[in-house]
Amino acid sequence: MDSIVVAGNGPLHGQIPIAGAKNACLTLMPATLLTDQPLTLTNAPRLSDIRTMTELLGSLGAEVASLQQGQVLALSSHDLTSHRADYEIVRKMRASILVLGPMLARDGHAVVSLPGGCAIGARPVDLHLRALEALGAELDLRDGYVHATAPGGLKAARFEFPIVSVGATENALMAATLAKGTTVLVNAAREPEIVDLAQCLRRMGAQIEGEGTSTITVQGVDSLGGATHPVVTDRIELGTYMLAPAIAGGSVECLGGRLDLVQAFVDKLEAAGVEVEETALGLRVTRKSDRLQAVNVATEPFPGFPTDLQAQFMAAMCTADGVSLLEEHIFENRFMHAPELMRMGAQIDVHGGTATVTGVEKLRGAPVMATDLRASVSLILAALAAEGETVVSRVYHLDRGYEHVVRKLGACGAKIERIKA
Ligand code: UD1
């Protein structure tokens, strides 16, 4: 298995291009299943999760051509040959459940494996299923699979999500585009990835209002057509690279960065003593002081502070001046990076959903292990300012969500390399 070696090396200076959003692309790709016309996605990120979704769609008979070094995906679901998403693929990636709503909406039947366990808590899919049931789906759970049917097609409904779920909102939104009548989704997720999906579906002919607010209204149509759609900027990759100069010092311009995607995160970064400026090309981040100030963070659904930036922010707080409380409100068991950061000398106490981080002057390089996608990049960030060398193993987690990490950070002066196993 490959590893990444980082030698703490002082301030970073340069520009980092931010890719299209993994999580947006993973919901836009299954939208191909809603139509027999071609869907083209531009600004796609080059990631193993995207390859997994390509494999899943391929197993259903959809065609996915990867063009321009993977930055353009041409998708067609003209001739679906299967409506069964197998466990072997679904278990690799939870987002696979997003094929359920579209297949059911277009063809009235689908069989999708339940995703199973996940490293960051139980993560059930009950809300996806309840929303689809509200739209008239009949569901039978057996042998680890959801067998879903809607013989006369899906029917519009009013559905209120008991808690905010990004994935369940996406599944319900896609399904509702072809349901008969007017669907109202209440307490819907407001994430930029939902807005991006709604914009793409509208390009395909869907009638949607209210995306980006907690009530989304969908007027069902008989069929959807093809479209070309650019994937929104990855706000999590953006926030991650904004933390690099915050931790190592220096000044980095994140190309394609947009404040509206990361406002709650930027508020915390500024409170910690980092300057963030809008430029013609994106966002420039500059650390002004020798040391960051400790700040408290609580993760919330958008527009709150994203759970997917909690691990990276913790890496920054490890060497901040003072004590910071990091509260995780979205997922249980999402502090697995804490023991690894402690191997580098960080002082962290985890009690339930709260981590108390007491800043130390310096971290020390150590062999550490990536436990999930965001945890893995938090270790790389921490290593940028640590004394000595850090070796991060199990970097396949990183490949799921970050393209060209070594190249992007290396171009700004970081001493970082990938060692092939
Ligand atoms: C998406 C993102 C993930 C991010 C998360 C929260 C993708 C591919 N992944 O995940 O990176 O961390 O949003 O911003 O877009 N829940 C249920 N039942 C369900 C669904 C969710 O109880 O049926 C719970 C989850 O366990 C969690 C909370 O709801 O506690 C929010 O999860 P959700 O927003 O659904 O996350 P994902 O869509 O899986």
Image (cartoon, helix red, strand yellow):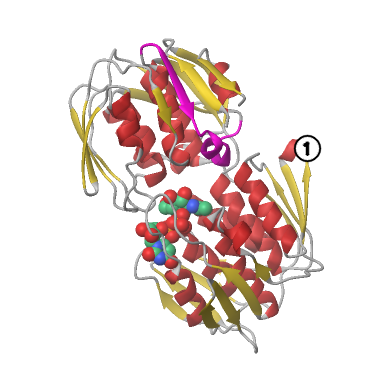
Residue 305 magenta: no
Foreground residue, 47 or 159?
47
Circle 1 residues within 10 Å: few <14, some 14–19, many ≥20: few
User: Can residue 213 be spotted in the picture?
Assistant: no
> Quadrant location of residue 146?
bottom right
Residue 390 magenta: yes
Quadrant where the N terminus is found in the figure: top right
Q: Which residue is mark 1?
A: 68
* Number of numbered discs: 1
| Label 1 SS | helix
Q: Residue 168 at x, y = what percent?
A: 48, 65
User: Can residue 98 be spotted in the picture?
Assistant: yes
> Quadrant location of residue 294?
top left
Foreground residue, 340 or 8?
340
Instruction: Kindly give the residue lying farthest to the right in the view shown.
Output: 79
Residue at the image point whose x is 70% and y is 66% from the top? 33
Up-down relation of residue 195 to residue 239 (above or below): below
Residue at the image point whose x is 38% and y is 67% from the top? 187
Residue at the image point whose x is 54% and y is 75% from the top? 143
Q: Quadrant of ligand 1?
A: bottom left
Query: Which residues are drawn in magenta?
Result: 387-403
Q: Is residue 59 left or right of residue 343?
A: right
Foreground residue, 300 or 319?
319
Q: Residue 140 at x, y = what percent?
A: 53, 82
Residue at the image point whose x is 45% and y is 26% from the top? 380
Q: Is residue 224 left or right of residue 266?
A: right
Q: Residue 170 at x, y = what percent?
A: 53, 63
Q: Amino acid at mark 1?
A: Gln
Q: Residue 410 at x, y = what percent?
A: 56, 17
